[in-house]
Image: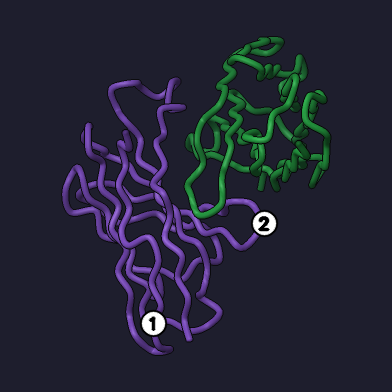
Amino acid sequence: GAVVSQHPSWVICKSGTSVKIECRSLDFQATTMFWYRQFPKQSLMLMATSNEGSKATYEQGVEKDKFLINHASLTLSTLTVTSAHPEDSSFYICSARDPTYGVKRNEKLFFGSGTQLSVL
Amino acid sequence: GQQLNQSPQSMFIQEGEDVSMNCTSSSIFNTWLWYKQEPGEGPVLLIALYKAGELTSNGRLTAQFGITRKDSFLNISASIPSDVGIYFCAGRSYNQGGKLIFGQGTELSVKP
């Protein structure tokens, strides 16, 4: 069964509204979670690294005020797309690292099922 | 930053045929991973490789970590319709904070 739960699976919103996406680790405590963005038939692009209890680390070119990340607990990270616009429409995927496997084995990076955001 | 070049971009094959795809990097990776993604879903890990030269199998899938640490390939033998999907390579380098860098993906279509 899924060990990382991502909700919602899809969301349609009006331009200018904010959308929150949740990523939960179900079977482990995830000190680190990652948020990716994926355009149709393209690769996953890392947006930010979310660390529990501290500020997220954003990749170059990603607006931190636009994509707010909160990792308030060891099992939940949220991504809020603020004042969404049509160009923000994309597939957003989170992943969570199971720390029990250690640094060299972080292939135990479990992915959520993704959220398809459509901004009208 | 580091980039991965994955090829081919797409493949259309007949059921039963073997498939090969590869990824190359401009710099060294410490880990190579291969994922499969189906429409509307997140990637699922297929094979993980940790050492240069390592050859690992998972059922009909075989992947190798290149000796130079700058490339990897994935082979699928005797393809079946359920192999359809997009396959991504991903590399991880310790000097990049352990972040995964993904290739562009190979879209596989299998004709029954």
Residue picked out by circle 2: A41
Question: Based on the displayed image, in which of its 4 quarters is residue B68 positioned?
Answer: top right
Q: Eyeballing the image, is A72 above or below B47? A: below
The residue tagged with tag 1: helix, strand or loop? strand
Around disc 2, counting alpha carbons within 10 Å, would you say few (fewer than 14), some (14 to 19), or many (20 or more)? few
Around disc 1, counting alpha carbons within 10 Å, would you say few (fewer than 14), some (14 to 19), or many (20 or more)? some
- The residue drawn where x is 78% and y is 39% is B111
Q: Is residue A64 left or right of residue B20?
A: left
The residue tagged with tag 2: helix, strand or loop? loop
Kindly identify the amino acid type of the residue bearing the numbered disc 2.
Answer: Lys
Kindly identify the amino acid type of the residue bearing the numbered disc 1.
Answer: Cys
Q: Eyeballing the image, is A3 above or below A79? A: above
Measure how far apart labels 1 and 2 are at the Cα level: 23 Å
Q: Is residue B59 left or right of residue A1?
A: right
User: Residue B22 placed where, x, y %?
Assistant: 78, 31
For chain B, give the colour: green
Q: Which mark is residue A99?
A: none
User: Residue B25 placed where, x, y %?
Assistant: 75, 35
User: Residue A39 placed where, x, y %?
Assistant: 60, 63
Tell me the subunit letter for badge 1.
Answer: A
Question: Based on the displayed image, in which of its 4 quarters is residue A56 positioned?
Answer: bottom left
Which quarter shows the C terminus of chain B?
Answer: top right
For chain A, give the colour: purple
Q: Nearer the viewer, residue A72 or A89?
A: A89
Residue picked out by circle 1: A13
Q: Nearer the viewer, residue B84 or B52?
A: B84
